[in-house]
Image (cartoon, grey):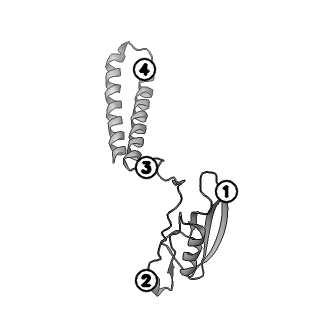
């Protein structure tokens, strides 16, 4: 919402600047500079609005990028929902548990309890504690046939 308001205000500011420069620009010999100035002003205001829009949502990183915490995950476990939607149950599907940011042993246990198979890959990163799940596929809370392989990427010491 703030981004749209920022773009609108940028356009209005650009038009005001263009009209001001157009009136005062009679003595300016290079009239081709006016559209460039207006465009740059609109881009700056739009960029500021985008940054403020991202901050207002509580994000420190640009939208869409994963945020990796360096704090160890809590020891509480994510429980697999006991009931799945009727259509998934009728089709014989199981829900993939969310094991992101959990210790590897806990994640393996939850995936196996759901009737799924695991495949673990280790990735060495200096800023992530070793032994925690960083990503999973299929996505958490999706449904899959029993016996489907869940690929986990677990952090390792760099």
Q: Where residue 18 appears, x then y in whole percent?
A: 35, 26
Based on the displayed image, in which of its 4 quarters is residue 41 positioned? Answer: top left
Label 4 sits on residue: 31
Based on the displayed image, in which of its 4 quarters is residue 40 positioned? Answer: top left
Label 3 sits on residue: 59
**Which label belongs to residue 78?**
none
Find the distance from the CA under tag 4 to the CA under tag 3. 41 Å
In the picture as drawn, the residue positioned furthest to the top comes out as 27
Work out whether residue 48 or residue 74 is closer to the camera in this orientation and state it: 74
Q: Residues within 10 Å of mark 3 (few under 14, many from 20)?
A: some
Label 1 sits on residue: 157
Find the distance from the CA under tag 3 to the CA under tag 1. 27 Å
Front position among marks 2 and 1 = 1
**Which label belongs to residue 87?**
2
Q: Residues within 10 Å of mark 2 (few under 14, many from 20)?
A: few
Find the distance from the CA under tag 2 to the CA under tag 1. 42 Å
């Amino acid at each position: 919402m703030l981004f749209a308001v920022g773009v609108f205000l940028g356009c209005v500011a650009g038009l005001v600047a263009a009209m001001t420069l157009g009136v005062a620009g009679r003595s300016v010999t290079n009239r081709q500079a006016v559209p460039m100035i207006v465009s740059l002003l609109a881009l700056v205001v739009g960029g500021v609005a985008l940054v403020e829009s991202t901050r207002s949502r509580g994000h420190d990183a640009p939208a869409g990028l994963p945020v990796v915490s360096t704090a160890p995950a809590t020891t509480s476990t994510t429980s697999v929902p006991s009931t799945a939607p009727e259509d998934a149950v009728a089709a014989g599907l199981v829900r993939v548990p969310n094991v992101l940011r959990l210790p590897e042993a806990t994640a393996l246990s939850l995936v196996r309890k759901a009737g799924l198979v695991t495949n673990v890959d280790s990735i060495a990163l200096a800023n992530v504690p070793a032994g925690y799940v960083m990503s999973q596929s299929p996505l958490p809370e999706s449904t899959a046939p029993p016996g489907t392989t869940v690929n986990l990427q677990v952090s390792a010491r760099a």
